[in-house]
Amino acid sequence: MTTSKGLIESDILGHFGPYGGRFVPEALIGALDELAAAHLSAQSDPIFQAELAELHRTYTGRPSILTEVPRFAEHAGGVRILLKREDLNHTGSHKINNVLGQALLTKRMGKKRIIAETGAGQHGVASATAAALFGLECVVYMGEEDTKRQSLNVARMKLLGADVIPVTQGSKTLKDAINEAMRDWVTNVETTHYLLGTVAGPHPFPTMVRDFHKIIGEEARAQVLELTGQLPDAVLACVGGGSNAIGIFHRFISDVGVRLIGLEAGGRGVATGFHAATITGGTPGVLHGTRSYVLQDENGQTVESHSISAGLDYPGVGPEHAYLHDIGRAEYRAITDDEAMSAFALLCKTEGIIPAIETAHALAGAIHVGKELADAGHKDAVLLINLSGRGDKDVQTAAEYFGIPL
Amino acid sequence: MSLTPLQQLFVNLKSENRAALIGYVPAGFPSKRECIEVIKAMVAGGVDAIEIGYPYSDPVMDGPIIQAAADQSLRGGTGAADVFEVLKATTDLGVPAVVMTYWNPIERYGIENFARDLSSAGGSGVITPDLTIEESLPWASAAEKHGINRIYVVAPSTVGQRLADVTQQCSGFVYAASLMGVTGTRTSVSAGAEALVARVREVTDSPISVGLGVSTREQAHEVARYADGVIVGSAFIRLIQESSSFAEGLLKVQELAAELADGVRR
């Protein structure tokens, strides 16, 4: 499972140790095989890679910059903190990396229609954007609850020409939006590509989405080396499904001295049961086509997740994270809503950067880890954080939380 | 290995020159107590075998009718014990029965334990709509040990070697999905169903049952011309959902079962 460079690759069936694989209706196997083949050939095709790189240069705005945040870092034990600014990408988050890659694959496979699920709306907006850019029909499934929490993003998707379908089944959030997207895909698989937005789902999605995001870690590793002359002591990222985290972790997996820390949504606290910390508080199981950690009850029913952040409000997690956790290569911790919002406010006021609430979980994790390192005498430690998204979409939620009248 | 009651049913029906009528209901629908009444009404109307659904929180192969039924059942607290209880009550009537379940509940229950308890309740097998053959090894050995059938679903998009590989893993019957889509009633049975059944016949001797979208006598009759079994779910459930009283629903279920039973006679 490990390549000569020490990076982790799945087996041919998409397994990361006991995790991953495919648990899907037989109707989808043909499409998944087609997608796996298209991804594999694109990976080694210089024309595809050049086309994607050019899009990233002229459309996404890559490479994204690295920002050092000393005033914020004073509150994290005084260690050095560097932000990888994925929030500055076109559409405002890391999601565009994966979306452009999959949209190019869609074109290659000759499909004209894409469907996507979205929680916070960031992946839906990115998908609608790519659909507009490539002239594809786009349908986005979004839990009815989330369409209310993120009404601004619903309007953005509509402006970009996408159909947004509110999902009224189940908990009316991200997991139900994925169910509905899967049902659409089973029905329309011949003409439609399911542009899944995270590193979960059946093979090849966890591997493919990771491959489209690993550019984050590749750029960041070189940027940190250039700035500091050393590798970071730890790399931190928030984890819902886990795409931005895998994106920044991947290139560092073989750097065994670099700690990889995923911050999950602890909601009101893992002990309360109202959380979305799947690895911290879940158990191995199967959800949405893959085996990983899942929030579930004793009958194998998925339990509703809770988080102030719509983008982390998901009861599953990517299988590669489950594996990295089990082998001890990455650590996963839970950050409560309150801790995340406090870190959110701190970054706003100390550095003039409004982060996504998802991302604020990683910032809160950095405050903990920075203090721990400083207490242990490592005041010169360097922390690299994936600033995965900007917080414009969260202004309403934050205003309500902090009691700012609108 | 001796035949399961389900396999014996298909052997018997061959001599009657008709297809089997298989009725689906989720355990615990409309309530734990009333579910068995629905099954009895189906059987009284002429259903030959029962497919008991294990209600699941994320049923990606099911349309709105069965989703709503599963939700109702889950709100009533249905769990594994209730599934086995209704299974036992069904097989006690002398009716062959299988369980239809998404994979996670089996994994959570314990693969070996699920096969054991299903067998103890007299169940003939399990339909697993989201278990791929690549992930089936532990299930295959558990099912074999306890002498129960493994039923996989194939779709119009299942072609070539893949169709042979999947159907080779099936026992009891092969579940042929009539169309690309989810469960639910349709105004007509997809023309793709007959073509799929013909392709399955070329690669296996197992009986073939067609599901997805069958709801009327005419549709059952049409499918029974080429298939060995006809599976009806949403049409029954809708009758319960739309009736003003449960008693009325039961009567309608029995009437529909009788019409469908007439339909499957060639």
Image (spheres, grey):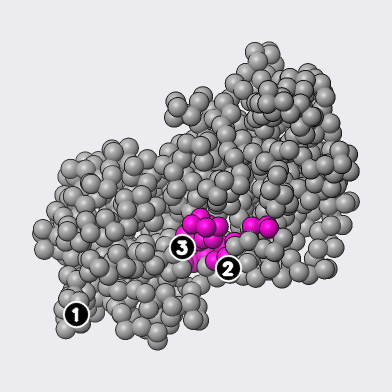
Q: In the rendered structure, does residue A14 fall within the stretch colored magenta? A: yes
Return the residue at label 1: B11
Disc 3/disc 2 C-alpha distance (Å): 19 Å
Secondary structure found at label 2: loop
Q: Give the number of marks.
A: 3
Residue at (76%, 47%) from the top-left corner? A216
Return the residue at label 2: A12
- Residue B179 picture quarter: bottom left
Q: Earlier in the sequence, mark 3 or mark 2?
A: 2
Q: Subunit of mark 1?
A: B
Q: What span is colored magenta in the figure? A: A6-28
Percent of width and height locating residue B3: 18, 75
- Residue B15 picture quarter: bottom left
Return the residue at label 3: A25
Most prominent secondary structure in the magenta stretch?
loop
Q: Subunit of mark 2?
A: A
**Tags 3 and 2 touching, CB below 8 Å:** no
Residue B40 appearing in the image? yes
Toward the front, the furthest residue is A377
Q: Amino acid at mark 1?
A: Val
